[in-house]
Image: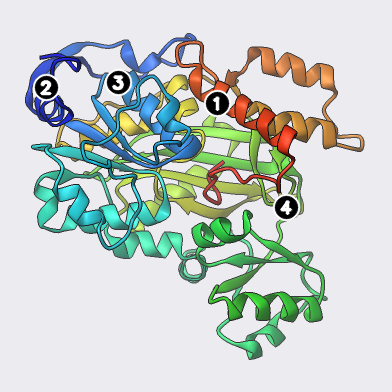
């Protein structure tokens, strides 16, 4: 049977059940190809993967799974960036499910013709929904490497996360919950460096406002912004801003399996950001674990206490005052730069697929250190807007770009990048209101 000779339903069922020779990815950190494909072959059941995601993260998860030779379908809108990929396959259905998490999502999933499939969520709400699926009757067909909903809610809800960290001894910024107007008086602006309002539900806030937070300079400004957001039903916390620049942000990405073992970690450092302050990384570089003293130990302790299972991406900031790494947040799903990690040797999407299937999870004890990854559109704007002694010279940025992995562009899969280029040209001609990327908060 071939894709051309079969209906979508027949091909889905065929790929979900037929054992074929596949590559179980190893951890080679070298080369510019697909490091996850260089390993020992074996016969295993080719259970399909379903990526529930869109934008940069959905595209990265799709490409990561294809590196491992895993048949993959994507639940996203037909005009999404991931749908431009040469590896894109929409889910069977008329119309196909686009990954929207609503009252019909479970019904749409159960109607799919797969005998079994592994779910790979790429957003916070999809991760929570996937945890419910995995823990219920549908979990017999639709597998997932996931923590419980209770664990995910602790990490996703910024108020609950701050309260949990307060009892662990893990370094983190001071955070103040706001249950009502009276809580605003407890925030002493005279003793804090800078503060900002941070949404408890970052995904909803980003969807409505296109950002991650709002600066507040004094008590009056805090009350003004909080009142407006509270009226919209948006819960917020006030968090102390950890002093330091964009290049003081560090990330630990990885995977923790069903046995509680860390199958692989990938450490990277943000060098530039766009937009400033509350944006996402426009240029980052992989670093050695030893460059983040104490951070890995803190994260492993936290994940162990929560019995965490699955993909994670934790963001730290090195405090310029004392040099300690402060834990800002932990994302519980794939993130913007998930493909970059896979190309450097840590394919967490492949690990999630293996773990969900009950297979031994291939470890990634090493990865390529010193590799760069650039989101070119964002980094051009970042470089051109930089001022002061720490600004990156254009020539220096060009040298970095020549040696880096491109976040979206790939010679093997050029259409997503070309679609972004075309979209940018159309916006310039029409000059509409600035468009927002699909960028879950904290994803880069």
Q: Where is mark 3, residue-wise?
A: 68
Q: Earlier in the sequence, mark 2 or mark 3?
A: 2
Q: Where is mark 2, residue-wise?
A: 44
Identify the image quadrant of residue 259.
top left
User: Helix, strand, or loop for circle 1?
Assistant: helix
Q: Nearer the viewer, mark 1 or mark 4?
A: 1
CA gap between label 2 and label 3 equals: 13 Å
- Residue 172 percent coordinates (x, y): 59, 60
For the point 11% across and 44% down, the residue is 141
- Nearest to the observer: residue 320 or residue 38: 38
Crowd band around label 2 with a 10 angstrom C-alpha radius: few (<14), some (14–19), many (20+): some
CA gap between label 2 and label 4 equals: 50 Å
CA gap between label 1 and label 4 equals: 45 Å
Q: Which mark, residue 419? A: 1
User: Helix, strand, or loop for circle 4?
Assistant: loop
Q: Which mark, residue 322? A: 4
Q: Earlier in the sequence, mark 1 or mark 4?
A: 4
**Residue lying furthest right:** 388
Q: Does residue 400 sit above or below 184 in this rendering?
A: above
Please report contact status of discs 2 and 3: CB closer than 8 Å, yes or no.
Answer: no
For the point 70% across and 46% down, the residue is 434
Q: Earlier in the sequence, mark 1 or mark 3?
A: 3
- Residue 425 percent coordinates (x, y): 68, 28
Q: Nearer the viewer, mark 1 or mark 3?
A: 1
Q: Is residue 371 visible?
A: no
CA gap between label 1 and label 2 equals: 36 Å
């Amino acid at each position: 049977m071939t894709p051309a000779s079969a209906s979508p339903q027949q091909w889905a069922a065929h790929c979900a059940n037929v054992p074929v020779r596949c590559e179980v990815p190893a951890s080679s950190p070298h080369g510019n190809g697909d490091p996850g494909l260089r390993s020992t072959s074996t016969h295993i059941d080719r259970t399909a993967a379903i990526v529930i995601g869109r934008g940069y993260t959905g595209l990265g998860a799709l490409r990561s799974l294809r590196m491992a030779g895993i048949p993959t379908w994507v639940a996203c809108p037909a005009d999404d960036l991931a749908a431009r990929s040469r590896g894109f396959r929409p889910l069977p259905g008329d119309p196909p499910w686009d990954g929207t998490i609503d009252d019909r999502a479970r019904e749409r999933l159960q109607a799919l013709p797969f005998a079994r499939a592994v779910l790979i969520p790429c957003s916070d709400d999809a991760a929570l929904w996937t945890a419910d699926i995995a823990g219920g009757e549908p979990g017999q067909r639709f597998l997932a490497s996931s923590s419980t909903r209770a664990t995910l809610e602790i990490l996703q809800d910024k108020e609950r996360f701050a309260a949990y960290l307060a009892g662990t001894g893990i370094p983190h910024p001071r955070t103040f919950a706001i249950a009502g107007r009276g809580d605003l008086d407890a925030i002493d602006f005279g003793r804090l460096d800078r503060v900002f309002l941070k949404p408890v539900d970052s995904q909803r806030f980003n969807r409505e406002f296109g950002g991650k937070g709002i600066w507040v300079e004094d008590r009056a400004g805090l009350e003004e912004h909080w009142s407006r957001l509270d009226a919209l039903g948006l819960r917020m916390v006030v968090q102390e801003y950890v002093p330091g620049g964009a290049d003081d942000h560090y990330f630990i990405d990885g995977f923790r399996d069903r046995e509680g073992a860390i199958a692989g970690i990938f450490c990277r450092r943000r060098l530039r950001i766009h937009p400033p302050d509350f944006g996402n990384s426009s240029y980052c570089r992989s670093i050695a674990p030893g460059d983040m003293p104490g951070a890995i130990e803190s994260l492993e302790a936290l994940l162990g206490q929560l019995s965490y299972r699955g993909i994670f991406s934790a963001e730290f900031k090195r405090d310029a005052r004392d040099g300690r790494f402060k834990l800002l947040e932990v994302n519980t799903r794939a993130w913007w730069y998930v493909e970059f990690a896979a190309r450097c040797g840590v394919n967490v999407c492949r690990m999630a697929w293996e773990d969900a299937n009950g297979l031994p999870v291939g470890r990634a004890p090493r990865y390529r250190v010193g590799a760069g990854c650039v989101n070119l559109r964002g980094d051009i704007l970042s470089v051109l807007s930089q001022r002061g002694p720490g600004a990156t010279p254009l020539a220096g940025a060009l040298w970095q770009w020549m040696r880096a992995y491109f976040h979206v562009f790939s010679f093997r899969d050029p259409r997503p990048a070309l679609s972004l280029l075309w979209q940018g040209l159309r916006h310039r001609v029409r000059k509409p209101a600035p468009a927002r990327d699909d960028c879950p908060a904290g994803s880069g």
